[in-house]
Amino acid sequence: MFMKDKYDVVIIGSGVAGLYAALQFDEDVDVLVVSKRELPLSNSSLAQGGVAAVLDKNNDNYKLHIADTLIAGKFKNNLSAVEKLVSEGPADVMKLNSLGVEFDTEKSGELSKTLEAGHSRHRIVHHKDSTGKAIVDKLIESVQQKSNVDMLDYALVYEINKVENGFWLGILKDGELNQVGAEFVLIATGGIGRIYKYTTNSAIATGDGIALAHMLGAEIRHLSRIQFHPTAFAAENERERFLISEAVRGEGAVYLNCKGERFAFKYDERGELAPRDVVSNAVIRESIATGSEDFYLDITAKDPEFIKSRFPMIYSRCLEEGIDMTKDRIPVFPCQHYLMGGINVDINARTNIDGLYAAGECTHTGVHGANRLASNSLLEALVYSRTAAEHMIYKLHTDGRKPLGPAPKPDSAEGEALPTGIRTKIREIMQDTYFVLPKPEKYQKSFEEVDAIVNNLITGNYAITADFVEARSIAIVAGIILDELREGINL
């Protein structure tokens, strides 16, 4: 099953943050990467637009990128965290380039840079419209070549126990419960999209890492800072909705209401290129005004060959839904997309629990403030996962390896069957209570309903299965969000 019963580092998650962190460790550091499903499945792989970085000092600079990030984040960002992101990020992007990630280039050989909403300069490097997949695939290939890194797929961490000098993790694999020790743990489990009825997130985005950290006593901050993307494909009754990238608007697409009219400029002078939360808010307000949820992106004015070349994945996916985006308007509507809060970490990606680190979407670094600027997410995953690894390496070299405390008594997987409908109930509550235009009058009642579900799952004698762990994670995460809202914590 496991090649070792103890590692120096266990990384939970195989998206960009987890994989890039694993790549930093030298051969003398034993690392285990735990992937909930197949290695390529993650929110990172779904990232379309690209990575924002200041790579052209003649036309861009750090101050501009910082300013754009602060404006999008409503100036609720942690300035030190943003400065670190913007100043260190370009080197990490070029590291990906050196690893062989095939970013699009101009005829001159220079990396192509596109514009996305909220950016004042063309600074987003990309691989067509599937940048995340290009990065993840290359990182998997690179990590698999490292002899000191073991990769375990289709495995779910269901508990983390703090002991002297480290941790013991409970891992569910092939229906069996296993224990693995580690001096350091990095949580890189991505987002929480599956607490909503509709999301752009993958099926694995159930907030497991945040729930595990919370149960361990880690500080969770601003979990109610949730981004709703304004242009998800409006596929009827599909829980996972594929994203129509920000870059489509950056390349000239216009947003139309049910009457075929542009409307975004009525709500903000930046129109379709306003930050995501602003555009989503405009869509919902326009929906109320028109009494319709029929909205469209229209890029048909652009050359068809340009569209097919620039957005091959989106073009193909739209065709599967019967839409030719070179000729037809694309039906879109806001849905849950990204998380700006999470496990609170410092500038070194450390939590308040010694030895526990976190990176990527599951964290609150303070980089994004109240709203994420487009294409800063992959950059954050790169910068802070590398930083986490560097800090662990420093600790190993300065403090040396220490004996790990004894493992707790193993759990039993046996127990009662999980009642059906728990996740569906939570999704309905969240979709109704806290979508683009929140309903504060429902916060208290919704919290009480979800809190009762959490207590039942925590105290009940349920069998430890993947369904149970995910239901528990979804309930805990939803409960924290609703608790923040009812307490009036500043968003």
Image: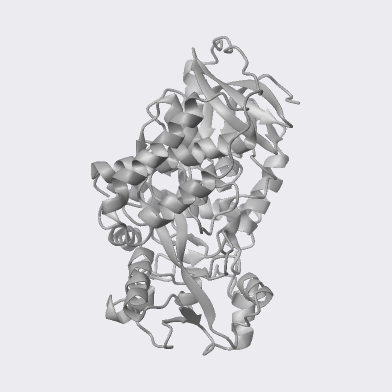
Up/down of 273 relative to 324, above or below: above
Regarding residue 296, the answer to whether it shows in the image is yes
Write the residue at 38% across / 68% down: 280
Considering the image in quadrants, where does the N terminus appear? top right
Write the residue at 72% across / 41% down: 144
Q: Which residue is nearer to you in this view: 330 or 111? A: 330
Find residue 414 and report its horizontal and vertical position in percent: 66, 23
Q: Which residue is nearer to you in this view: 155 or 308? A: 155
Find residue 205 and report its horizontal and vertical position in percent: 55, 47
Write the residue at 44% across / 64% down: 229
Q: Which residue is nearer to you in this view: 304 or 467? A: 467
Left or right? Give the position of 379 relative to 352: right
Counting the numbered discs, the total is 0
Find residue 189 and report its horizontal and vertical position in percent: 54, 41
Regarding residue 343, the answer to whether it shows in the image is no
Up/down of 446 relative to 304, above or below: above
Q: Which residue is at the far right?
A: 1
Left or right? Give the position of 298 relative to 346: right
What's the coloring here?
one colour
Find residue 332 and report its horizontal and vertical position in percent: 50, 73
Q: Which residue is nearer to you in this view: 76 or 197? A: 197
